[in-house]
Image (cartoon, rainbow, N blue to C red):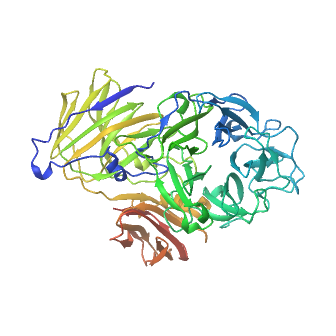
């Protein structure tokens, strides 16, 4: 049962010595980058999106329970808004006679009300040249207006396609990207004779990317550009491809890979790109995490005319782009794809976004914010949905005082002295927090009528140090003061605990439990908060390099720092950690069974590391680099000779 807890306190520093009286509010936008943002763990999002009052614009119903993809288009001719919504069976199932499909909705009052106009294509089955089976599934579409016509880019599969053959289609099945046009945005759209590209004709890029789907069409000065999403199947990597043509119907160049996790630079894993939009000379490509908790979004951008140059793309924002609201139509957070939209002439960025409600039905919703003000001045959101979320503050103790203003629905915990290793529980989609992330911290657990102080040890065992009851209130005041390891906890101005409450150099943070929502208005630390070291597990390295689990052997061995690790099992084994920090230390055990590997830092060879030793040795730094620039970095490890172990990466 959901509940609301509001925590607050009034903070006075007059009784503190000047040398430790400095206070920082980490809920202010100026401290936004002090929070770690991650596609699996979660984030503290400062985004300024505000929801439309009439959400959802559409809700799924049987048999099409999942309308979870779509795009929003403003018609420059009529000024009307259009939603092109992809309707799926639950679980993205393929069922005979029930194809996934796209329908169009129109609003004549800027999204206040919507009319459902029906399918975007006519009823006559379309068979592409070179195919024996007609187009059956065609759910995801984007539309643009140019040269007096409305141009659509859409993904499709033939009737004989299944999830088992989608990546390697047989002669009687196929999928890919198609083009269609219409004289009006309502349609019906006429499908071109030939597809833009097909999966069967696509040679695997990087040996793994082949299936082509979710695409965006862009008009450039002298050609047409299609940006297409592709996946790597068992490698759990997603990439953005580009292809161009002189005419919108093609023929198009062969797809070229533009953005992908295997690149040597910083690239958050598990990101799906769809759809992109154009504004002010740039293509903007938001991308959604497909971890169990999906609210993390990245935002990539590139000058329109440079889009086919991979080096021209930049990660404009890594997280802090989107937040969920604690309402029933957003029960699962953003879900299915990322947001899509346009910037209106008044400078307001309007988007549609998909989610799922409490019963699991897909919902199509709208939100907006000023384009030139992406963040709120104060306050952030941490939310858990199908999985829990952890927002880590890259500041550690000890401090003299902590105060916070929070609104909590569900269950949440303020934590400190956090020294747990970070990493996903598995290097795949639907990844969540590794079990070891529930270790090595102290926390204040909060509920509607009670509070508890708890401590988790290095093995994940926890003990309750104190507990008490509080009267339900719409607003609470909470404050913790420390004098060494002794502390005073106040709730609503009442002293509810005093005694030993250890703190150390570990990080502060906020846990949000599954299907919980935390809105933080203040998060103040008083004292000389230090920058702690963070440790990333080997699972982070595998996820960051889009690795198949068949390329690695998981082992339990006390030589690893946390008793578990992996050893390379094939020539394709590679690891990559994306991190922010000025120091990086790679840990690994050594032994007679190991060979050597090359370490790359930000794409450049940094060292050749030998993991060989005459006798087994416990994990220790095998590569160390300090003095790195503040900002984003990537450390990759590739095989050179024989097998090599993978343990963890420590950063500061």
Q: Nearer the viewer, residue 295 or 400?
A: 295
Q: Quadrant of residue 403?
A: top left
Q: Is residue 641 visible?
A: no
480 left or right of 254 in image: left
Q: Position of residue 303 (x, y in %)?
A: 56, 61
Q: Quadrant of residue 639?
A: bottom right
254 left or right of 434 in image: right
Q: Is residue 129 visible?
A: yes
Q: Position of residue 544 (x, y in %)?
A: 52, 60
Q: Nearer the viewer, residue 365 or 448?
A: 365
* Quadrant where the N terminus is found in the figure: top left
What's the residue at 61%, 42% (across, down)?
336
Q: Position of residue 597 (x, y in %)?
A: 50, 75
What's the residue at 58%, 67% (across, down)?
310
Q: Nearer the viewer, residue 211 or 507?
A: 211
- Rendered position, 3 above or below 149: above
* Quadrant where the C terminus is found in the figure: bottom left
What's the residue at 63%, 29% (across, down)?
59
Q: Position of residue 376 (x, y in %)?
A: 39, 42
What's the residue at 27%, 32% (across, down)?
8
- Most distant residue in the right direction: 132
Q: Nearer the viewer, residue 581 or 640?
A: 581
Q: Quadrant of residue 75?
A: top right
């Amino acid at each position: 049962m959901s509940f609301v807890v509001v925590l607050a306190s009034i903070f006075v520093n007059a009784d503190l010595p000047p040398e430790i009286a400095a206070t920082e509010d980490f809920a202010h936008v100026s401290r936004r980058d002090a929070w770690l943002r991650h596609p699996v763990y979660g984030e503290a999002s400062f985004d300024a999106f505000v929801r439309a009052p009439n959400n959802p614009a559409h809700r799924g119903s049987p048999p099409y329970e999942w309308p979870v993809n779509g795009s929003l288009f403003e018609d420059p001719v009529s000024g009307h808004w259009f939603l092109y919504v992809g309707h799926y069976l639950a679980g993205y199932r393929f069922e005979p006679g029930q194809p996934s499909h796209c329908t169009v909705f129109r609003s004549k009052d800027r999204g206040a009300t919507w009319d459902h106009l029906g399918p975007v294509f006519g009823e006559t089955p379309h068979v592409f040249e070179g195919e024996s089976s007609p187009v059956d599934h065609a759910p995801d579409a984007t539309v643009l207006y140019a040269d007096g016509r409305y141009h659509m880019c859409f993904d499709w599969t033939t009737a004989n396609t299944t999830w088992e053959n989608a990546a390697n289609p047989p002669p009687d099945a196929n999928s890919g990207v198609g083009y269609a046009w219409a004289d009006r945005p309502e349609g019906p759209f006429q499908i071109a004779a030939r597809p833009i590209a097909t999966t069967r004709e696509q040679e695997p890029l990087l040996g793994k990317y082949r299936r082509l789907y979710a695409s965006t069409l862009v008009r450039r000065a002298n050609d047409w550009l299609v940006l297409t999403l592709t996946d790597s199947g068992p490698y759990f990597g997603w990439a953005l491809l580009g292809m161009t043509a002189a005419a919108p119907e093609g023929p198009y160049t062969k797809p070229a890979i533009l953005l992908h996790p295997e690149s040597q630079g910083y690239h958050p894993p598990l990101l799906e790109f769809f759809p992109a939009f154009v504004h002010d000379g740039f293509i903007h490509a938001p991308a959604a995490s497909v971890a169990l908790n999906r609210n993390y979004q990245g935002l990539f951008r590139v000058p329109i005319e440079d889009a086919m140059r991979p080096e021209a793309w930049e990660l404009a924002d890594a997280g802090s782009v989107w937040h969920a609201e604690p309402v029933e139509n957003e029960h699962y957070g953003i879900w299915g794809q990322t947001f899509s939209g346009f910037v209106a002439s008044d400078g307001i960025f309007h988007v549609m976004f998909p989610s799922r409600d409490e019963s699991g039905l897909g919902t199509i919703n709208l939100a907006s914010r000023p384009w030139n003000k992406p963040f709120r001045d104060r306050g952030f959101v941490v939310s858990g949905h199908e999985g829990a979320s952890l927002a880590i503050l890259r500041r550690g103790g000890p401090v003299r005082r902590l105060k916070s203003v929070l609104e909590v629905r569900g269950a949440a915990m303020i934590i400190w002295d956090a020294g747990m290793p970070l990493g996903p529980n598995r290097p795949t989609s639907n990844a969540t927090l590794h079990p070891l992330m529930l270790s090595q911290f102290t926390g204040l657990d909060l509920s509607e009528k009670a509070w508890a102080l708890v401590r988790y040890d290095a093995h994940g065992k926890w003990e309750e140090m104190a507990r008490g009851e509080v009267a339900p209130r719409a607003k609470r005041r909470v404050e913790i003061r420390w004098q060494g390891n002794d502390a005073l906890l106040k709730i609503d101005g009442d002293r509810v605990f005093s005694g030993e409450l250890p703190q150390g150099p570990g990080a502060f943070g906020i846990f949000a439990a599954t299907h919980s929502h935390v809105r933080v208005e203040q998060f103040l630390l008083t004292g000389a908060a230090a920058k702690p070291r963070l440790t990333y597990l080997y699972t982070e390295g595998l996820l960051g390099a889009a690795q198949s689990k068949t390329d690695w052997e998981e082992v339990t061995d006390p030589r690893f720092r946390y008793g578990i690790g992996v050893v390379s099992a094939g020539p394709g084994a590679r690891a990559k950690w994306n991190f922010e920090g000025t120091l990086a230390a790679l840990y690994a055990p050594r032994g007679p069974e190991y060979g050597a590997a090359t370490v790359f830092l930000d794409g450049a060879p940094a060292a050749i590391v030998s993991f060989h030793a005459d006798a087994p040795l416990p994990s220790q730094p095998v590569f160390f680099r300090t003095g790195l620039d503040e900002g984003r970095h990537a450390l990759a490890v590739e095989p050179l000779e024989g097998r090599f172990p993978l343990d963890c990466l420590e950063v500061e």
